[in-house]
Image (spheres, coloured by chain):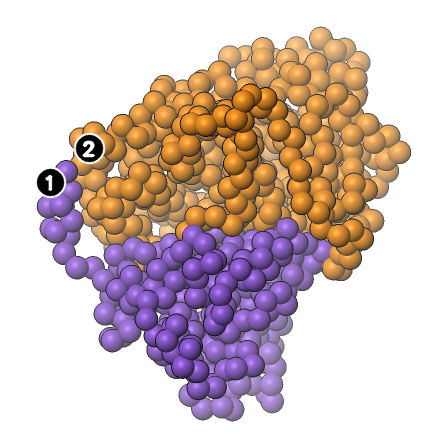
Chain colours: A orange, B purple
Amino acid sequence: MANWLDVLKQAEQRWSGKVHASFGTHPRECELDCSPPIVAELCGWLFSEMHYSFGTLIAEQRDSHWELRYVWYGEGDQGIIHVVVRQVLAEEIFGTLIGRVHAVDWNEREAEDLFGLIFKGHPRLGDFVLHNGRWDENVTPMRRCFDGCLPYIHTQMEKDWRPLLVLEAPGAFAMPIGPVYSGVAESALFLLETQGEDVVRAVPRLFYKYRAIEKIAEGRPLQDALLLSERCNGTSAFAHGMAFCQAAEAIEGLKVSTRAKILRVLLAELERFRHHVAAIREICESTGLAVATSQAAILEEELLSLCCAFTGHRYLFGLNAIGGLTRDLEGSACLEAIRVGRNILTRLENLQDALRYSSSFLDRIEDVGTVSQADAEEFGLVGPIARASGVSRDLRELQPYSGYEHFSFAVPCEQEGDGYARLRVLFSEAEEAFRIMEDAALQLPEGPIRIESVNDLGSGAALGWAEAPRGATFHWLRTKTDGSVARYRLATPSFMNWNGFHLAAENFAFQDFPIIMATFGLSVAENDR
Amino acid sequence: MSHWVLKGLKTGIKSTRYPEQEETRPGVSPGLPSPGSSFVQIADICPTGALLRENNHIAVDYGRCVHCFRCARTTDLPPLAWQSGYEWGFLSGETAGDAPTNLERRTFGRSLHVHLVDAGDCEACLSEITQLNNPYYNMHRLGFFVTPTPRSADVLLVVGPVTDHTRQPLQKAYDAMPTPKRVVAVGACALSGGVFGPSFIAGSGVGNVVPVDVLVPGCPPPPLAILHALLVAVDRKPSGLKTLSARFAEENVEAG
């Protein structure tokens, strides 16, 4: 693996005169400005030869130009590289990366739909975030001229959606599921094309829950935008809030105290622990294993009550603040939380043992919903799903934040890529999360809990990142001179992973579909934002 | 499979005794702000306008509170006291307080089927509704069941601010339900739009799309609050909050 300074040097030599590296305030971040014609080549080179992972695409409308920012991250020394392309506002056509980096697919479609930018050569632009049949083609809410606060008056009647079907065979049909379906499920539509027993093509239609967080955050004060970042997904609120705060702190140059950092680690791991127990419960539920579901649900509820008794909120809302945390957690309270957590972990291990010997359960998840390592890399999958397919990437380890470099922990990884591998990763990660919590509680130093921000530090931009329970999340924040939000980009793990969901769902029988959904454990809210 | 049976039996009974008895286990509810503080400046730090200045006192619009805890944890002013409790179901609508008709008594008096529509929530409210099926809350013991179809539903639970794309599915689900029916709006977003609405894409609550009978505030409301709202919806419990916007002057406005 090449050191990132070498990577930058090589890039500058290879495309001499067309690529310029510049450094920001963060010691491990760098910007590579490049001219529009070579961006695909440069990104393709980073991806396939330098083995960087694609983070996200950030589109921004600046005063006089468009700015596209492709975020790449590598291991340790490789740092985080922003590939930046600028074009004057009148120039709305960009080249697509899709031939070289497939992971960029949905990012480009989103930018096309919301900003009205064209990615020339992308095969699937069109109906995406704003549903066709409801919104006019020329509505581009993320542009500055669009007022996101006013209600939008639709000019057309709502029409039914006519999807493009590709399966041509005797007896072929498309089975729609959703947007309101099942007992307690999020709103999303799945179109399963089939000839009978097996799902040949699975097309999720998402963004029913699009709340335009990125748009409505604009103009709000930072601490109000923080409320939005927590509520992009309530079940991983702390991780998102933490990433947001890190971005805001980087802009304001705030040095968060060690105590606050370690407490953030503790709480983020508590959230991961709870999230994974909930995901395990869902997998048990999808296979109809009633006792195991109840056992996991008991643990989940105990963790939720623990969160509430420990921090005041069952989903850890309202704890993160720019500059630290809103409340201190006593060392004795932390130790009590660890004691309760250990008891829960023991019972979780018992549950895992019991599941391991339930052949009827294993039959339903083994060799079901398989995603190969090559596919996982190509589609840029993140989090436990990627790690179950042999892609051992975890931002806590690759690009440590909030003091994760001081913790030693394993990143569980499996090779099979099937439902059972994902379940095993969830169990191992839950255990690791608890070990990190334990470590954090033991090494908690004294110190202030929150550094008050000095107002009016002016405008700036920064990236915050975190490994949320479902995978890598990136929060890009640009502030105006009055300290309010100019642009907020919220890149979530579910947005990356839904793009690869069909890999698992296709070529499996209908009755496996709910199980594959459960083992993927994706959130629609986190994707739709 | 015998080890599962044994495991289940060994676990014993976990279910709460609510509604017969109050639930006292720690961590079942995050609480809500209490009205009454005379430091009216504290209203300025509320990001959603849930704290109102009223006659030199603070009143609370529970439907807007998103549990950001700013008023509880401020260091610049004396922090606002929070109340514990979870009986937050609030009867609203035109027929609130009317005696139920015979048909309503027959429909809602027996087992009750609940249909859920997610109109753009952040998944926290949805997760809390899922918890109603866990052994601690186990709403089946009260005769409540979740049904996947609106055709056989008596009660419609709605979460989220109603985004533009979920408006039509929500309307269709409501229309598909047989009468008599009840609608319960769950969480700050469903009540007032919460942190999301109103905007070009999200509304300011379920009430603008379908008539709502019971409101339950919270971000998210804890499972017991949702359970209470269901009991309120079928006249098995009285309304918990006398008014959603609690005034200091009124007596006994506190929940729980």
Taking the image as shown, residue A284 lies to the left or right of residue B235, namely left
Tell me the crowding category of disc 1: few under 14, some 14 to 19, or many 20 or more residues within 10 angstroms, Cα based: few
Nearer-the-camera pick, A27 or B186: B186
Q: Residue at x 48, y 58 (%)?
A: B150
Residue B250 seen in render: yes
Residue under label 2, please give it: A358
Nearer-the-camera pick, B47 or A355: A355
Taking the image as shown, residue A207 lies to the left or right of residue A415, namely right
- Pinpoint residue B45: horizontal percent, then vertical percent: 59, 69
Mark 1 chain: B
Nearer-the-camera pick, A323 or A282: A282
Q: Residue at x 50, y 28 (%)?
A: A194
| Mark 2: secondary structure | loop
- Pinpoint residue A207: horizontal percent, then vertical percent: 61, 44
Q: Furthest residue to the top?
A: A14
Q: Residue at x 18, y 39 (%)?
A: A350
Residue type of the residue flagged with mark 2: Ser
Q: Is residue A38 above or below residue B113?
A: above
Residue type of the residue flagged with mark 1: Ser
| Mark 1: secondary structure | helix
- Pinpoint residue A490: horizontal percent, then vertical percent: 61, 42
Label 2 close to label 1 by CB (< 8 Å):
no
Q: Is residue A466 above or below residue B45?
A: above
Q: Which mark is residue A165?
A: none
| Mark 2 to mark 1 CA distance (whole Å) | 10 Å
Q: Quadrant of the C terminus of chain B?
A: bottom left
Nearer-the-camera pick, A382 or A184: A184
Tell me the crowding category of disc 2: few under 14, some 14 to 19, or many 20 or more residues within 10 angstroms, Cα based: some
Q: How many marks?
A: 2
Q: Which mark is residue B2?
A: 1
Taking the image as shown, residue A303 lies to the left or right of residue A258, namely left
